[in-house]
Image (cartoon, rainbow, N blue to C red):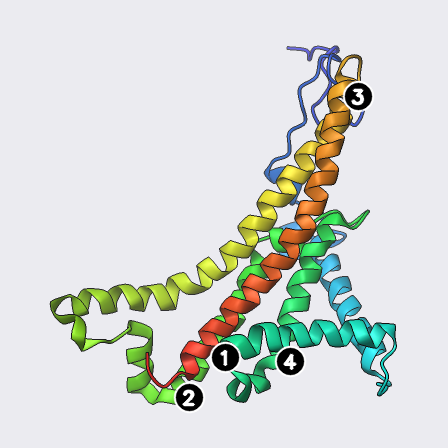
């Protein structure tokens, strides 16, 4: 059966409303990228998200290197911004959660984590990039596993094997007969579910935000035909609104991710649980 020549493929850029083509709605295909280098079939390749992650890392390192390479008593603008960001994570997250005495040694780790997550989120609104790296589950999952391994190691180091077991199972004999059930739930929650929820919280927000932003962006172009132009204007306004909203959410998600990481470490270091 021959294809109808009046039907335009949904992903064609010249597809507009009233042209006989369907709305090119975003989907899972919007989160898949062809390899820039290598063969995707052999799992040895380099794609857009990997490039953005690499560039983001270089941007962060370059920014802090430029800001602190030659620190001054009276800081310049770049050093002032870098110090403000560093101090925000140190005082606003680490000290508030872990405490100054215990938390100081974890400040560099948390600052790195915060700015890396934030930069990966920010790619969503950067022209040409236009994609949040953390909307691919593997990236937040790796970060969550790093935090999880750190929590496990610190708990075992601070409390020993018995204390480690009590920590991850929430051992509390005062709750009586339900103690075995409570310990079983806490055990699976901490060892299996914790890194998963830590990663999914970041991933889901970035995935949903990018999908909505993509939806309104595509709709703005798709409606540019006839009377649909009026609706295209409304859709474009929503693009601007969603972009501003995404800026807020991107910073909040970086904050929440690091806040949870600090709370896990605080739990590992605490004497009583």
Q: Nearer the viewer, mark 1 or mark 4?
A: 1
Using the image, tell me which numbered label, if any, was put on residue 108. Answer: 4
Residue most toward the left?
Answer: 177
Label 4 near label 1: C-beta < 8 Å?
A: no
**Where is residue 200 drawn, in percent x and y?**
50, 55
- In the image, residue 15 above or below residue 247: above
As helix, strand or loop, the secondary structure at mark 1 comes to loop
Using the image, tell me which numbered label, if any, was put on residue 134. Answer: none
Residue under numbered circle 3: 224
Determine the CA span between mark 4 and mark 3: 49 Å
Q: Of the residues under marks 4 and 3, which one precedes in the sequence?
A: 4
Residue 154 or residue 2, whichever sits in front: 154
- In the image, residue 107 above or below residue 45: below
Label 2 CA crowd tier, 10 Å (few <14, some 14–19, many 20+): some
As helix, strand or loop, the secondary structure at mark 2 comes to helix
Q: Of the residues under marks 1 and 4, which one precedes in the sequence?
A: 1
Q: Residue at x 85, y 73 (%)?
A: 78
Image quadrant containing the C terminus: bottom left
Determine the CA span between mark 1 and mark 4: 14 Å
Image quadrant containing the N terminus: top right
Q: Residue at x 31, y 85 (%)?
A: 163
Q: Of the residues under marks 2 and 4, which one precedes in the sequence?
A: 4
Residue 95 or residue 106, whichever sits in front: 95
Would residue 263 appear left or right of 202 to someone viewing this image?
left
Determine the CA span between mark 1 and mark 2: 17 Å
Q: Of the residues under marks 3 and 2, which one precedes in the sequence?
A: 2
Determine the CA span between mark 3 and mark 1: 53 Å
Label 2 near label 3: C-beta < 8 Å?
A: no
Residue under numbered circle 2: 157
**Where is residue 106 drawn, in percent x and y?**
57, 82
């Amino acid at each position: 059966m021959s294809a109808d020549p009046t039907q335009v493929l949904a992903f064609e850029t010249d597809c507009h409303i009233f042209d006989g083509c369907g709305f090119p709605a975003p989907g899972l295909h919007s989160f898949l990228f062809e390899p820039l280098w290598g063969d995707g079939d052999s799992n040895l390749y380099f794609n857009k998200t990997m490039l953005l992650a690499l560039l983001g890392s270089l941007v962060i390192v370059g920014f802090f290197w430029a800001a602190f390479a030659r620190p001054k008593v009276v800081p310049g603008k770049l050093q002032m911004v870098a110090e403000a960001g560093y101090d925000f994570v140190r005082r606003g997250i680490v000290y508030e959660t872990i405490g100054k005495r215990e938390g100081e040694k974890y400040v560099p780790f948390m600052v790195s984590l915060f700015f890396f997550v934030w930069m990966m989120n920010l790619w969503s609104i950067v022209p040409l990039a236009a994609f949040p790296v953390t909307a691919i589950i593997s990236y937040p999952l790796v970060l969550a596993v790093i935090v999880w391994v750190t929590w496990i190691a610190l708990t075992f180091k601070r409390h020993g094997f018995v204390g480690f077991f009590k920590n991850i199972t929430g051992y509390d004999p005062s709750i009586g007969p339900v103690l075995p059930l409570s310990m079983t739930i806490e055990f699976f929650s901490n060892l299996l579910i914790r890194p998963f929820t830590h990663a999914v919280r970041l991933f889901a927000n970035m995935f949903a935000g990018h999908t909505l932003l993509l939806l309104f962006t595509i709709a703005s172009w798709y409606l540019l035909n006839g009377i649909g132009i009026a609706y295209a204007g409304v859709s474009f306004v929503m693009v601007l609104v969603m972009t501003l909203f995404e800026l807020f959410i991107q910073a909040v998600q970086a904050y929440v991710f690091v806040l949870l990481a600090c709370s896990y470490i605080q739990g590992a270091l605490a004497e009583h649980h």
